Image (spheres, helix red, strand yellow):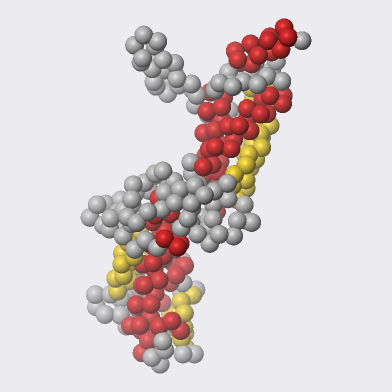
Amino acid sequence: GGGGNDQCKVDVTVSRDGSVVVAVGTQDLGTGTRTFTRAIVAEELGLGIKDVVEQIGNSKLGSANSSGGSTTAASLSPSVKDAAVKTRLAVAEKIAPLFGNAKPEEITFAGGNVSGGGKTIAWKQACAALPAAGITSHGVWRSELQSRGVHGVCFAEVEVDVETGKVRPIKMVQVQDGGLPLNRLTMESQINGGMIQALGMALWEGRTIDADLGMQLNPTFMDYKLPGSLEMPEMIPIIDDEDTREVVIGIAEAAIIPAVGAVANAVFNACGVRVRELPITPDKILMGLMSERRSA
């Protein structure tokens, strides 16, 4: 699993009207960056995720790591958390007179309200006591909030037609850990994506290279076979909740690894042919079956 690095700088701004903006240069490639960036800040300030606006993907914003390599979440989320905590304490300090000059750490934020000194008021009412320019806090990477090293296991069921050599995946179940899930739905989606990519590697994806020119002969989606919706089996992603590490770890690429071997082993279990070169295409199955008959 991918650990993070010290590249992300995050700004969180709270205005007097109660609006909250979290800003960083990181891009979102569809892996949930927008969601967890807002969610971390919202949780720290006791707000709903819809109450926080994200600004991302612009070099004018805080510096950021590249988006990819299973490192984005582990690089960005600790910086967001750091900025969110600093923002909470900074806001609490400014509005402390509303709560009898309670200590900032004694003021709580929950359910869209702010409480302290035996008094509770709405978030927007509290923010009206902020300076005209609002409050802006800068977050930096905190290494103790992230880690690396994930583990997964996949179970696959396939059907092999011994007359045609066609392999039909029926069901896949994959268990994956990953430290602290920032968003369970997107983590399950990444596990599903790993199983789908592994299916492509195991059964369909293969480059055809011209032996003399070294050029790929199937470079387009018209020629290079990827698994489509009709090839995808029933997939059950399971998050390992026995992983009690309270740290963020990237899992996207790691989720691809277990299923390839599971599919190859399922093919062997179904027909007795051990294919050692991917993809496992019908011709390899038929040649393996023929070899088995000859040696019988």
Residue at image point 56% right, 21% down: 277
- What percent of the width, then of the height, locates residue 284? 60, 15
> Which image quadrant: the C terminus?
top right
Residue at image point 40% right, 10% down: 211
- Quarter-of-image position of residue 162: top right
- Quarter-of-image position of residue 93: bottom left
Toward the right, the furthest residue is 296
142 lies left or right of 15: right
Q: Residue 164, can we see it?
A: no
Q: Is residue 191 above or below residue 23?
A: above
Toward the bottom, the furthest residue is 100
Residue at image point 49% right, 44% down: 252
- What percent of the width, then of the height, locates residue 91? 35, 78
Q: Nearer the viewer, residue 114 or 5?
A: 5
Q: Is residue 254 above or below residue 123?
A: above
- Quarter-of-image position of residue 273: top right
- What percent of the width, then of the height, locates residue 94? 33, 83
